[in-house]
Structure formats: structure tokens, C-alpha cells
Image (tube, rainbow, N blue to C red):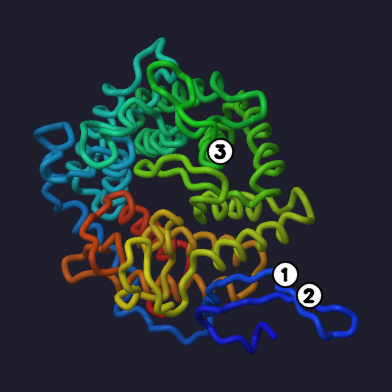
């Protein structure tokens, strides 16, 4: 009867009945929301993906807080308050400027900005001998959640920053960036638990976990994999295996894909699910599908979880975490996490990447069509000045530089590797 149930709120009642069918007892009841499924056609992009990319790069580069890195060589918190999430937002400056430089190779200033940002992060990393030595600082100052978590490390964040260092090394060939990444990797090796995981939040001064919640370490695996495959540093291979084994034995069994965000504390099981780690792991096993005949099916099941819980193909006509109507939501779109159950640009980007990984592995066109529908929505969200807003809903003014940077890398990938432009 599922196909006959209309989209929207559903009340389910289960009753037990005796053999005579004259006595009924309520066995259970539940309210849930039946979300709309993928049902094209969806709006085409208002202009080409290449145009969206160039407009976005120009916006990113010309932001005052980006330009301030040229002379100030440090984050200007007045111009961009989200620099309180230091590794995340400063790291995104590195990534954004490297992509800008790819399309504007005559502009050496972009590389200067990227190096200034990287040098700042390295200079302010945890000192040698600290429990998480050489890790980049996750928080700086007291703004927003930084004041609350200032003595903590979100364990996965350094792996993303290290990847940025490696990208910068590839352009500049300055060994200090490669060395910084390797030092971070070595600290991960020393702190990995026997079960193959790490705790999600660690006190930076004592090395003691602040909560008994394990991190889902796929981002660390991806970082180690880069070092192993691209730089032939095979000493990380055993750590990769241990971490992957932990993922198979834990979230792949329980589906407790708990969120790992700078501004949200670690939560009890199933209290703050997200599609990020699940979709990253789906991408990982799609890439390694030749190793096991069951990997494709497992990856598809992960996509089903992500799509069922977080992808919005049409407006649900409900209310978000803060009691706001969803009437202003841009759709199709993707929600971020249970604690921020609203459409976020980078969440769409994450699912586009995952659908594309599925398309590459299976050649099933449905995945490509889903990716394209979300990508067109991303382009259509772009404002006249080139900015892609973080929140696809009214009432939110925060702009996260890292989110738009991930959007631009997706557009670059699509323009470079898929022989389509306007669809």
C-alpha cells in the first residue's frame, strides 16, 4: 500500500486481533513523514556550469576578508566572524585560492593568500609534546560555539587541513607543507585506539576524550589513503585497515551515522544523524568495488539512507528545528544534520558527489539524473554577485566560506570531467 499513501504526515496504527476478530488491542502507533521521491523534470540551470564556476570564483576572491590576508597575514574576525572555526574556515581560504589560481594562473596573489593562510595555521598548531601535537587549532576566540569548545579538538578536522596542505605543496613544492601534513598523520597514528577508531572530541590539553562518542574516521582514512597512494607512504596502510574494519563493524551495522560538526556537541546514538560520513563511506566503497562483490549493494543502501533522511525533492510543507515554515526552502536540496535540519548548499554538493560516484561505479543513469537535478538547483541558487548562499531558507544570514568552496570544486569537477555544460 506504500505507493498509495500520499506524501506528507502519516499516522500509522497497529492493532492485534483475536481469532474471532471481535477484540482489538492497540499494539503500537507512530506519526511519520512520507517524503516525495525523485520525480523529474526539475528546473534546468539558469546558465552554464562554467559560468557559475567563474562567477563564484570571482566572488570568493574579492571578499574583503579574503583580500585582507595579503597584508594582514591572519584572519580578520571582524570581516568574517566564522574564522572562530579556525581550521575549517582558514583552511577553506587555502582551497579556494588554489582553485582560483587554476583558472587565473597569472594572478600570483591567490597563491600568496593561500600560503599566508597555511602559514598561519601551521604557526598556531598544537606544539610539539602536546597530546595532539601539530594538529591545527579548531577554534579561535570566543565567538559563537568557539568559546564553549575552545579547549577541545574535533578529531577529524586536522585531516581536512592536512589535505589542504598537500594541495598547496603540489603547487608550490615547498616541503614545509608536505611536512606539516605528515606530522599531522603521525599524530593520528599515535592516537588511534586499539579498536581502530578515535574519540570524536578530545581535550587539547590533557588528551582525554570529552565525551565517550567515537568518531566515524572516514575523513582520516581518505587522508591516509592520499599519503599512501600519491606519496607512497605505506606506513599508514595498517591504520587504514583498522579504521575501515571499525566502520564495517559499527556504523555499517547500527546505521548510527552520527554528526561531527564544529558547532554541535557530540550526541547520544541516533540523536544527530547526518549524511556526511555515510555518503563518504559510500564513495569509498564504490571506488573500491572491485575488492568485494557486495560493495556495490552496500553503497546503494547507504545512498538510500542518505536520500531517505536528507534529500528533499519537493517542498515538504512542514517546520524546521526552529519552528520556521519550510515554504521558503529551495528544492531540490539536501538537509545537513538532525540538529540543523535545513537545506545547506554544501549538503547538496555532498550528495551530488555521491550520486556521481554511484553513476561511475554502476553506469545507472538514475544516479546521474539525480546529481544533475541537484547541481542545477545549486546553480539556480547563485546570486547576481556570484555568491552561493549557505542556507537555502529564509531567516539565516551566516555565510560559510568552506561550504561555497566545496560547491566550486564540484563545479570544477563537473566542467572538467563530464562533457556537459548546460542541461
Of tags 2 and 3, which is closer to the observer? 2
Whether label 2 touches label 1, CB < 8 Å: yes
Give the quadrant of residue 373.
bottom left
Q: Is residue 66 visible?
A: no
Which is nearer the eye, 151 or 181?
151
Which mark sits nearer the N-terminus, 2 or 3?
2
x and y percentages locating residue 174 in the rendered image:
34, 27
The label on residue 217 is: 3
Task: Estimate the x, y position of residue 123 in percent, counting from the top left.
Answer: 27, 22
383 displayed left or right of 416: left
- Looking at the image, which residue is at 64% across and 55% down? 286
Residue at x 56% of width, y 41% of height: 216
Q: Residues within 10 Å of mark 3 (few under 14, many from 20)?
A: many
- SS for dot 1: strand
Secondary structure beneath disc 3? loop
Residue 16: which disc? 2
**CA gap, disc 2 to disc 3?**
44 Å
Q: Locate residue 391: give its quadrant.
A: bottom left
Q: Residues within 10 Å of mark 2 (few under 14, many from 20)?
A: few
Q: Residue at x 16, y 66 (%)?
A: 385
Which percent across, then down, holds residue 258?
Answer: 53, 47
- State the residue position of label 1: 27
**Left or right relative to 51: residue 407:** right
From the viewer's side, name the closer residue of 229 and 375: 375
Q: Is residue 220 left or right of residue 80?
A: right
Quadrant showing the N terminus? bottom right
Above or below: residue 267 compared with residue 117: below
Mark 1, Cα crowd under 10 Å, few <14 / some 14-19 / many 20+, is few
Name of the residue lying farthest toward the bottom: 4
Q: Earlier in the sequence, mark 2 or mark 1?
A: 2
Amino acid at each position: 500500500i506504500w505507493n498509495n499513501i500520499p506524501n506528507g504526515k502519516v499516522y500509522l496504527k497497529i492493532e492485534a486481533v483475536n481469532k474471532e476478530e471481535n477484540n482489538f488491542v492497540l499494539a503500537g502507533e507512530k506519526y511519520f513523514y512520507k517524503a516525495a521521491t525523485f520525480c523529474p523534470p526539475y528546473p534546468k540551470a539558469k546558465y552554464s556550469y562554467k559560468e557559475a564556476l567563474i562567477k563564484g570564483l570571482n566572488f570568493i576572491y574579492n571578499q574583503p576578508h579574503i583580500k585582507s590576508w595579503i597584508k594582514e597575514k591572519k584572519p580578520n574576525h571582524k570581516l568574517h566572524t566564522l574564522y572562530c572555526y579556525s581550521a575549517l574556515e582558514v583552511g577553506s581560504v587555502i582551497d579556494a585560492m588554489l582553485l582560483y589560481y587554476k583558472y587565473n594562473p597569472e594572478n600570483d596573489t591567490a597563491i600568496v593568500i593561500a600560503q599566508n593562510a597555511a602559514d598561519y595555521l601551521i604557526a598556531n598548531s598544537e606544539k610539539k609534546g602536546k597530546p595532539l601535537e601539530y594538529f591545527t587549532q579548531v577554534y579561535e576566540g570566543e565567538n559563537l560555539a568557539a568559546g564553549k569548545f575552545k579547549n577541545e579538538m574535533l578529531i577529524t578536522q586536522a585531516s581536512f587541513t592536512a589535505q589542504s596542505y598537500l594541495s598547496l605543496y603540489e603547487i608550490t613544492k615547498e616541503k614545509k607543507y608536505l611536512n606539516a601534513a605528515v606530522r599531522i598523520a603521525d599524530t593520528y597514528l599515535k592516537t588511534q585506539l586499539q579498536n581502530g577508531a578515535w574519540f570524536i572530541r578530545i581535550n587539547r590539553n590533557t588528551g582525554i576524550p570529552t565525551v565517550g562518542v567515537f568518531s566515524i574516521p572516514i575523513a582520516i582514512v581518505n587522508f591516509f589513503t592520499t599519503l599512501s597512494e600519491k606519496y607512497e607512504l605505506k606506513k599508514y596502510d595498517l591504520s587504514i585497515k583498522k579504521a575501515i574494519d571499525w566502520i564495517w563493524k559499527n556504523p555499517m551495522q547500527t546505521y548510527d551515522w552520527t554528526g561531527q560538526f564544529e558547532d554541535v556537541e557530540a550526541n547520544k546514538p541516533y540523536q544527530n544523524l547526518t549524511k556526511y560520513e555515510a555518503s563518504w563511506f559510500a564513495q569509498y566503497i564504490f571506488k573500491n568495488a572491485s575488492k568485494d562483490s557486495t560493495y556495490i549493494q552496500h553503497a546503494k543502501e547507504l545512498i538510500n539512507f542518505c536520500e531517505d533522511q536528507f534529500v528533499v525533492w519537493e517542498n515538504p510543507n512542514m517546520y524546521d528545528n526552529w519552528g520556521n515554515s519550510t515554504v521558503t526552502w529551495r528544492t531540490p536540496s539536501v538537509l545537513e544534520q538532525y540538529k540543523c535540519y535545513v537545506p545547506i548548499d554544501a549538503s547538496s554538493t555532498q550528495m551530488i558527489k555521491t550520486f556521481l560516484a554511484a553513476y561511475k561505479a554502476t553506469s545507472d543513469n538514475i544516479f546521474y539524473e539525480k546529481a544533475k537535478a541537484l547541481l542545477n538547483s545549486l546553480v539556480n541558487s547563485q546570486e547576481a554577485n556570484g555568491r552561493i548562499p549557505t542556507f537555502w531558507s529564509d531567516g539565516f544570514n551566516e555565510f560559510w566560506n568552506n561550504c561555497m568552496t566545496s560547491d566550486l570544486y564540484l563545479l570544477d569537477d563537473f566542467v572538467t570531467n563530464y562533457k556537459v555544460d548546460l542541461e
